Image (spheres, helix red, strand yellow):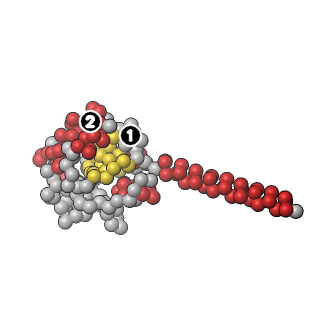
């Protein structure tokens, strides 16, 4: 009788452990599948921009604004893009009016401003919200660990930078005041 009880207990524990392992594997696999490549958005001209086109590239996503103290970073972003685009870097700008109403323009006005003042050639998406109840799905992915599998973060201000690796996964979050030419970013690009 004692042997039957021990055998039953052993089988129960074995079965329970196997079940839990499968649940953890399924959860892990789900997290691994979530990448920036799942998104399609519209650019400033209204054309669909599919992130799957960026597979195998390093991507910097930046929320931008035309009337911000950080707006001159457009120049550094463009310089960085020109220097490293041949090394598989893509910078993607997302204009947003979430901080101090510093991006009041329409998509057309934003495109004109970027071209006229900074000669921006990197992809610029249509204006979105990067925080709050109307936060865009791309920024939900970037800021929520449950979606990106790496970390929770909050967009602090205009020109916060999200660094995405060649597998489409979030690598780092860089504060708005940090220059696009900062050594931590350049080393990440080269690494």
| Quarter occupied by residue 191 | top left
**For this view, does 18 lie left or right of residue 44?**
right
Q: Does residue 121 appear anywhere in the picture?
A: no
Q: Are marks 2 and 1 in contact (CB under 8 Å)?
A: no
**Residue at label 2?**
85
Q: Residue shown at 26%/45% (left/top)?
A: 184
**Please, which residue is most extreme toward the bottom here?**
133
The picture places residue 178, in percent across and down from the top left corner, at 21, 52
Q: Nearer the viewer, residue 21 or 149?
A: 21
- Residue 166 numbered tag: 1
Q: Residue shown at 71%/55% (left/top)?
A: 14
Q: Secondary structure at mark 2?
A: helix
**For this view, does 189 lie left or right of residue 18?**
left
- Residue 116 numbered tag: none
Q: Nearer the viewer, residue 143 or 133?
A: 143
In space, the residues marked 2 and 1 are separated at their CA atoms by: 13 Å
The picture places residue 158, in percent across and down from the top left corner, at 22, 57
Q: Does residue 71 appear anywhere in the picture?
A: yes
**For this view, does 124 lie left or right of residue 147?**
left
Few, some or many residues within 10 Å of mark 1 (<14, 14–19, 20+): some
Few, some or many residues within 10 Å of mark 2 (<14, 14–19, 20+): some
């Amino acid at each position: 009788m004692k042997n039957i009880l021990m055998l039953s207990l052993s089988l129960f524990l074995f079965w329970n452990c196997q079940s839990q392992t499968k649940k953890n594997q399924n959860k892990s696999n789900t997290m691994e599948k979530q990448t920036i490549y799942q998104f399609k958005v519209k650019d400033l001209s209204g054309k669909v921009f599919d992130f799957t086109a960026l597979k195998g590239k390093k991507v910097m996503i930046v929320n931008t604004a035309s009337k911000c103290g950080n707006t001159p970073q457009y120049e550094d972003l463009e310089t960085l893009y020109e220097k490293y685009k041949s090394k598989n870097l893509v910078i993607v700008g997302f204009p947003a009016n979430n901080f101090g109403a510093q991006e009041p323009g329409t998509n057309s006005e934003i495109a004109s401003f970027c071209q006229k003042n900074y000669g921006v050639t990197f992809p610029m998406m249509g204006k979105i919200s990067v925080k709050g109840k109307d936060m865009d799905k791309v920024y939900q992915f970037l800021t929520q660990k449950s979606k990106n599998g790496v970390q929770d973060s909050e967009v602090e201000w205009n020109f916060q930078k999200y660094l995405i690796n060649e597998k489409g996964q979030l690598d780092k979050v860089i504060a708005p005041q940090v220059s696009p030419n900062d050594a931590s970013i350049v080393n990440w690009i080269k690494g």
